[in-house]
Image: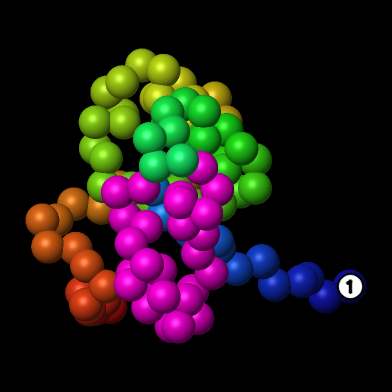
Amino acid sequence: MPRRPPEPFVYYLDANLDGPDLVARLRGGGMRCEAHRDHFAPDAEDEKWIPPIASHNWVIVTRDFAIRRRPTERTAWTVTKATVVMLRGEKLSATCRVRY
């Protein structure tokens, strides 16, 4: 029996990355992404939104490197086995080019 290809990743952009221009560019480029503002209040506590997002198996993309040092947030993403990608850079925007 042939294997089914894996489902494409869905990227969940944390509140620090979910600007409408970036979301539109990513979606326009064929990436499946969800914006934090479409699911939670901008000031929602990380430990509240991480578990439901992890339950969808969405990849969490954030610029918040401190999340790994705050005990309740770190517990939320380790217990739920969330996939978290942390981006570093001062000039991240919808106009950034991705190079492979």
Magenta includes 36? yes
Residue at coordinates 25% horizontally, 53% vertically from top-left? Answer: 87
Of the 4 image quadrants, the one containing the C terminus is: bottom left
Q: Is residue 48 above or below residue 42?
A: above
Residue at coordinates 54% horizontally, 25% vertically from top-left? Answer: 79
Colour mode of the rendering: rainbow
Where is residue 74, by image quadrant?
A: top left
Residue at coordinates 61% horizontally, 48% vertically from top-left? Answer: 57
Q: Which residue is mark 1?
A: 1
Q: Is residue 53 above or below residue 81?
A: below
Q: Is residue 8 above or below residue 17?
A: below
Residue reaching furthest to the left = 90
Element assignment for label 1: loop
Tell me if 42 is positioned left or right of 97 in this view.
right
1 vs 91, nearest the viewer? 91
Residue 10 locus on image (x, y percent):
55, 61
Q: Amino acid at mark 1?
A: Met
Residue reaching furthest to the right = 1
60 vs 44, nearest the viewer? 44
Residue 38 locus on image (x, y percent):
52, 54
Residue at coordinates 10% horizontally, 56% vertically from top-left? Answer: 90
Of the 4 image quadrants, the one containing the N terminus is: bottom right
Tell me if 37 is positioned left or right of 52 in this view.
left
Tell me if 62 is positioned left or right of 36 in this view.
left
Residue 26 locus on image (x, y percent):
41, 74
Would you say residue 60 is visible in this rendering? yes
Q: Which residues are magenta?
A: 15-40
Would you say residue 85 is visible in this rendering? no
